[in-house]
Image (spheres, rainbow, N blue to C red):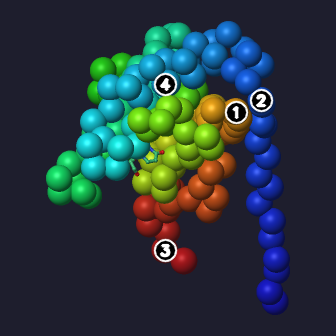
């Protein structure tokens, strides 16, 4: 019998950073600021990510591109790797992402790529804690309460467990 299942996905949309709570607003402005430090000579697309740890600390990352294109890495993974390497006991609870070009902040929100979604999901799984994702464009902000919701039917460490039948 074929069943059709539905995975609900809800998120919030805001018009302006003023509508964010003060902590999330600070996180978003940190992501926008660090985007200026991106190394993105090939795409010209400069991305900043700011991760809030449960202690309140903010950890930053940018995309870092490479002449061998696949060797480049996204801002989100750089920020999460930085957090995990330097603060392994302090779990990420939120992450803001912002992007800009020479023309200024991106008009649309920038959403994490598939690789980054997988890494966000692993962090949530590992820490047993949701990571709130705050995406921003020039005139729009989106909040996803649990980053793993961006990756339905995700592969995780449970899938690696061997179960005979
Ligand atoms: N990029 C990120 O850093 N994060 C995203 O969410 C989307 C894409 C980077 C990868 C590459 O350096 C550039 O943006 C263009 O894809």
| Disc 3 target residue | 164
Please tell me the numbered disc located at residue 15.
2
Which residue occupies 49% across, 74% down?
164
| Residues at marks 4 and 2, CA–CA distance in whole angstroms | 17 Å
Which residue occupies 80% across, 86% down?
2
Please tell me the numbered disc located at residue 139.
1
2 or 3: tag closer to the N-terminus: 2
Question: Helix, strand, or loop for circle 1?
Answer: loop
| Residues at marks 3 and 1, CA–CA distance in whole angstroms | 52 Å
Where is residue 118 shown, x and y percent of the image? 48, 51
Q: In which quadrant will I find the C terminus?
A: bottom right
Circle 1/circle 2 CB separation < 8 Å: yes
4 or 3: tag closer to the N-terminus: 4
Which residue occupies 63% across, 18% down?
24
1 or 2: tag closer to the N-terminus: 2
| Residues at marks 4 and 3, CA–CA distance in whole angstroms | 46 Å
Q: Does the residue labelled 1 lie within 8 Å of ligand 1?
A: no
From the viewer's perspective, tell me whether residue 23 is left or right of residue 90: right
């Amino acid at each position: 019998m074929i069943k059709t299942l539905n995975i609900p996905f809800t998120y919030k949309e805001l018009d302006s950073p003023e509508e964010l709570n003060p902590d999330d607003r600070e996180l978003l402005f940190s992501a926008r600021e660090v985007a200026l430090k991106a190394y993105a000579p090939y795409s010209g697309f400069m991305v900043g990510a700011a991760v809030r740890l449960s202690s309140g600390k903010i950890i930053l990352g940018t995309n870092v591109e490479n002449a061998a294109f696949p060797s480049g890495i996204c801002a989100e993974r750089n920020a999460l790797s930085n957090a995990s390497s330097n603060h392994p006991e302090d779990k990420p609870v939120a992450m803001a992402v912002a992007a800009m070009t020479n023309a200024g902040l991106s008009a649309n929100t920038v959403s994490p790529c598939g690789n980054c979604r997988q890494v966000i999901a692993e962090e949530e799984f590992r820490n047993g804690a949701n990571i709130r994702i705050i995406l921003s464009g020039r005139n729009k902000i989106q909040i996803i309460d649990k980053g793993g919701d961006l990756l339905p039917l995700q592969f995780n460490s449970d899938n690696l467990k061997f179960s005979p039948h």
